[in-house]
Image: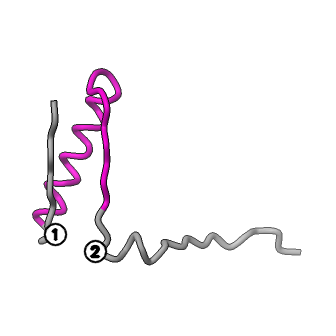
Amino acid sequence: MNTEKTKVHFTDSNLLNATNPVTINLIGASGTGSKVLTALMEMSHSLTELGHRIANTFMR
């Protein structure tokens, strides 16, 4: 009897559709927030290099 489950991954089409904007509000940039900010900027740079339009807005 085979009890191993087949691993399946589904990604919602809204996440794959480049026309849907994503807004991220990062509040506080000390400790973990600074790590998150760094990761967001790396993703933004990578997406820009791949030809995606990215709008970065920073507030103090």
Q: Quadrant of the C terminus?
A: top left
What range is drawn magenta here?
22-49
Q: Which residue is mark 1?
A: 52
Is residue 13 located in the magenta-colored stretch of the structure? no
Q: Which of 56/32 is in front?
A: 56
| Residue 3 higher or lower than 57, as above or below | below
In depth, the one of 58 and 13 nearer the eye is 58
Report crowding for label 1: few under 14, some 14 to 19, many 20 or more residues within 10 A (C-alpha): few
- Number of numbered labels in the structure image: 2
Residue 57 locus on image (x, y percent):
15, 47
Please provide percent x and percent y for residue 26.
30, 37
Tell me: residue 35, above or below residue 10.
Answer: above
Q: Residue 51, percent across and down? A: 12, 71
Numbered mark located on residue 19 in the image: none
Say if mark 2 contacts mark 1, CB within 8 Å: yes
Look at label 2 and name its amino acid. Answer: Ala
Give the secondary structure at mark 1: loop
Q: Position of residue 14 (x, y in %)?
A: 42, 73
